[in-house]
Amino acid sequence: MNSKIQTHHLERCAYVYVRQSTTTQVFQNTESTSRQYALVERAHSLGWSAPAVSVIDEDLGRSGKTAQDRTGFCRLAEAVASGETGAIFAIEVSRLARSSEDWQRLLALCAVAGVLVCDEHAVYDPQSCDDKLLLDFKGTMSEAELHWLSLRMAGARRSKARRGEYRFPAPTGYIWGGNGFEMDPDLAVRQAIAVAFERFAVEPTLGAVVRWARRTGYRVPTRRSFADGTTELTWQPLQRSRLGEIIKSPIYAGAYAYGRRPERKVVVKGKIRSVRRWAAPDEWQVLIQGAHEGYISWEEYLSNLDKLQENAALRPSQGAPREGRALLTGLLICGRCGRRLRIQYWGGADNRWSYTCFGAKDEGAPTCWIVSGAAIDAAVESLFLRMIIPSELSLSLAVEHEVEAQAASLHEQWRLRLEKVEYEARRAERRYKAVDPDNRVVARTLEGEWEARLQDVEAMRHQYEVAKHEHRVQLTDADRARIRSLAQDLPSVWHASTTSPADRKAMLRLAIEAIAIRPIDVPERLTHIHVQWKSGAIDELSVARPAFGQTGRTPATTVDRVRELVAQGLYDDAIADQLNADKLETGAGRPWSRAAVQRLRLRNRILRVAPEQPRKLPLPDRHPDGRYSIRGAMKRFQVADTTIQRWAKRGLVEATREDYGQYRNVWWLRIDDETAQRLESLRRRRRPTTNDNNAGMS
């Protein structure tokens, strides 16, 4: 027995630590794994009994570069710190740690707890200076060895990548061929990928494309490759993350790219972590344009990246068109300092908003300026609808051509998917007919597979028919006529209830590049608007700018209208009805009511000229035609109003609502003799209340 091994070491447990860096090494480097497990016999030969030796092998397939996610190493360190460990067995230092930080921490614990470190050839005591120096040197060499290996492997990968020969998993739509990436031989896969790019060119955001895919039944393919060379193709609903990967990949633009996500060190919660983040194209390690056939051009790819960046939230850019009522979000630029203005909503239901230029607020400077947004939006909207008047015929043909192209792409994708499942059904049929009928076990299995493929064909045909009718995969003559009529009347499309605020913003951005606004105070308070169109043309206009505190007040034209109605001798409720009929709103964007008219009159000192309304006479217990009011029925049957309401709700008595004199929506109950007898019997059978019992007792 080695002289460094003492009795107190043998009285504690010995741990054999087994690790391989990757799963491939676990299955291919079997000799190394066997040598590590053989350390159990070495522990026995050094004096540890069989029950005292434990094997920790849960880190098989995990790298020793860091202790993160290595549960076995963490359990080993805890066992050392608890004082229950006498020795650690490892085939070499590199199995325990490839990081000097982790290695030194473990050695420090072993030195304090009196734990030995053993390999195939020697026993080391961390408490001994000579052994500690040797272990430190081995740990440093292990970390450096990993660095050298990484450099050699990375250099080899970069060298092959510069020639376009380094192979990584091909994105769906491509396969690896003799000369690099080649188009997928499945026409349905190629068509589906092409449709994704075509739709993103039309829709404003990734989310809009995903919503379109759900409406139309569009599915995206995924081809998985296996180690034996086989592949599996599945069709899944389109997800936002998957679409983002397709749009961001330069492979689809015909470019071979390597090193798009370089690794870098960052500090996260006080710990150093390795992260990978997307880099700009000019920072990629290798970029070979035109290396293979692409689905889009390189210019389209860069345009798509710019579109994604513009749509990103919390950036100094336009951002994606959203559902807020503010029309010019993302287009406005301050005419004073050149910064982009931000939107702020006020009041309920986003009925008021303002545009704010915060200026150099991050540097401690005050806000540049703020302006109400409704007037500016209305002026730009009016200008847009006046200026965008293209030839009706050319616009109709262009819109119809675009819709036809989109419908044709979807139709082709459905046709190819249907053709694919029909082929699978025919192949299953051939396999079933080729088997010996006497071999019933195989025949039954193949018959079931054939039946399943036939069901897939029927399901695909049904989905296709639903898509053709509900999602307009194929356009009818009525659809074409509707498209032409809408293309000829842009204001109708703009104001249609089915056109969302995001759609209006998207239409606006197709024609307008940017809008600069600046305040004017002399000779009157105005907002100067400078509109720059995509064509390069420029239009200028000005709108009134209300003073601070006046935003949300009733327009002067509405106040004048109220004065006219008051002069005609109308009461407040009649004035409210007339204002609502004129489609006028309050300053807060709400309908008019009697109380709102009264507040407006008092605020603007508009005196009512109409005589005082006569005082309301009390509502009679019975209508002239014999019907009862609620109060009359209560007196008639000596019950509470809740009982009358319950009778009416249960249909025991006929109840209607109508105006009576100055009263609005009065409930009237029709009670004949038969109904009265029935209600009397119900009243007599009702359970006595607590008050009734107390009254009887008194």
Image: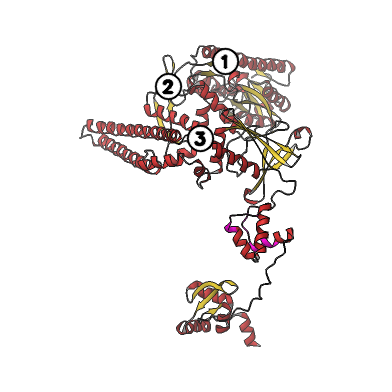
Which of the two labelled residues, at mark 1 and mark 3, occupies the earlier sequence position? Answer: 1
Q: Is residue 213 above or below residue 15?
A: below
Q: Which residue is more in the foreground, 419 or 624?
A: 624
Residue flagged by tag 3: what amino acid is it?
Glu
Q: What residue is rendered at 73% in x and 32% in y?
A: 336
- From mark 2 to mark 1, how far is it between C-alphas? 24 Å
**Which mark is nearer the camera, 2 or 3?**
3
Crowding around mark 2 (Cα neighbors within 10 Å: few <14, some 14 to 19, many 20+) is some
Q: Is residue 395 visible?
A: yes
82 vs 412, left or right, is right
Does the magenta segment cover residue 595? yes
Residue flagged by tag 2: what amino acid is it?
Ile
Task: Provide the residue designation for mark 2.
Answer: 175
Whole-percent x, y for residue 641 in the image: 58, 76
Task: Provide the residue designation for mark 1.
Answer: 154
- Label 1: element kind: helix
Q: What residue is rendered at 65% in x and 41% in y?
A: 376
- Label 3: element kind: loop
**Which mark is nearer the camera, 2 or 1?**
2
Whole-percent x, y for residue 258 in the image: 54, 18
Task: Provide the residue designation for mark 3.
Answer: 203
- From mark 1 to mark 3, how far is it between C-alphas? 40 Å
Whole-percent x, y for residue 451 in the image: 29, 39
Does the magenta segment cover residue 279? no
638 vs 219, left or right, is right
Q: Which residue is more in the foreground, 91 or 695?
A: 695
Q: Which residues are magenta?
A: 580-598
Residue flagged by tag 1: what amino acid is it?
Ala
